[in-house]
Amino acid sequence: MANNVNNWLNEHGDYLYRFALARLRDPHLAEDVVQETMLAAIKGNNFEGDSSARTWLTGILKHKIIDLQRKQVREQPVSDLIDLDGSDSTMDDFFDQSGHWLDKPQTLNMPDNDLEQKQFLAILDECVGKLPKKLKAIFLLRDVHELENENICKELEITATNAWVMLYRARMGLRKCLELNWA
Amino acid sequence: MLTCKQASKLISQSLDHPLSWSERVRLKLHLIICDACTQFKQQLNLLRTALQHIRNATENDLNIQLPSDVKDRIVRTIESDQQ
């Protein structure tokens, strides 16, 4: 058993870790989810010879990433979730009472130059890291993991309206963070 | 007539589900006369593209490896779990 895990980790561990880190943007969470994948792989033992071990393990990993993000969303107090249905008072930071922008959105472009592009992406990555846990989880599932909205609602057991409001807030915060730190 | 607040919400939602016919028309009319919301729309498009870059860069960066102490920890955890 442990032998299998050893082999899997040696052959695919780095790949699985990069795959998870790319979608979770957090080394510790990525490590945890690789461990969960190994546990599930050894327990399930339902590897079909017609797919490669890597494809099989990646399939398990994708589910484990969603499971983990679901926990991130659920750990938040219920009151927070209820608030999402109601008013959008948090948008008061961005709009005046008549619904006009307080600060007009600025021009943001991805730099062509490699080095500048790296810096730009690093700043965006930091901005993602600053999002509230719950918003970060749903945003990463949608815009990085590219899960369909319908599946997000099903997996996280939230309404479509809740999902839109959370994604709207996450995107609103991120573009502001980019404006402040890059433009 | 949509306010910028309403328009920005629709712009974000259009990334997640197809807007209704009337939402599309109202948003289009708003964007014709509103530079700020047009800019916002471009920002959200940029955000999407940039995040895909970030994801791909991490996936393809062979310097990123699962630390060996984490590998050992995982093997130990599974060994103790099996007992």
Image (cartoon, rainbow, N blue to C red):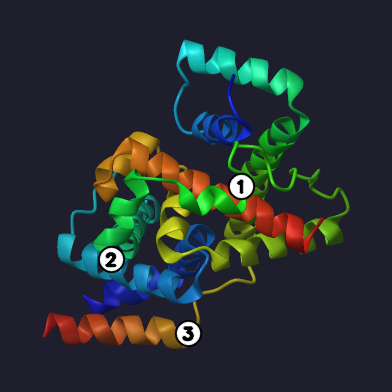
Pick whichever, A6 or A29, lies toward us: A29
Instruction: Look at 84% across and 56% down and name the residue there.
Output: A114
Q: Which residue of the protein is positioned furthest toward the left in this rendering?
A: B83
Q: Amino acid at mark 2?
A: Pro
| Residue corresponding to mark 1 | B52
Instruction: Report x, y in % for residue A11.
Output: 45, 67
Residue A144, visible in the rendered structure? no
Residue A174, visible in the rendered structure? yes
Tell me where residue B39 sits by quadrant: top right
Vertical placement of B10 versus A78: above or below? above
Instruction: Say which element carries label 3.
Output: helix
- In the picture, the quarter occupied by the N terminus of chain A is bottom left
Tell me the CA gap for discs 2 and 1. Answer: 31 Å
Q: Is residue A176 left or right of residue A74?
A: right
Q: Chain of mark 3?
A: B
In front of the other: label 3 or label 2? 2
Q: Amino acid at mark 3?
A: Ser
Instruction: Say which element carries label 2.
Output: loop
Tell me where residue A64 sits by quadrant: bottom left
Q: Which residue of the protein is positioned furthest toward the front in this rendering?
A: A97
Tell me the CA gap for discs 3 and 2. Answer: 36 Å
Q: Is residue A104 left or right of residue B2?
A: right
| Residue corresponding to mark 2 | A77
| Residue corresponding to mark 3 | B68
In front of the other: label 2 or label 1? 2
The reply to whether the C-beta atoms of the residues labelled 3 and 1 are less than 8 Å apart is: no
Instruction: Look at 71% across and 56% down and name the residue there.
Output: A178
Instruction: Look at 67% across and 34% down and name the residue there.
Output: B41
Is circle 3 on the same chain as circle 2?
A: no
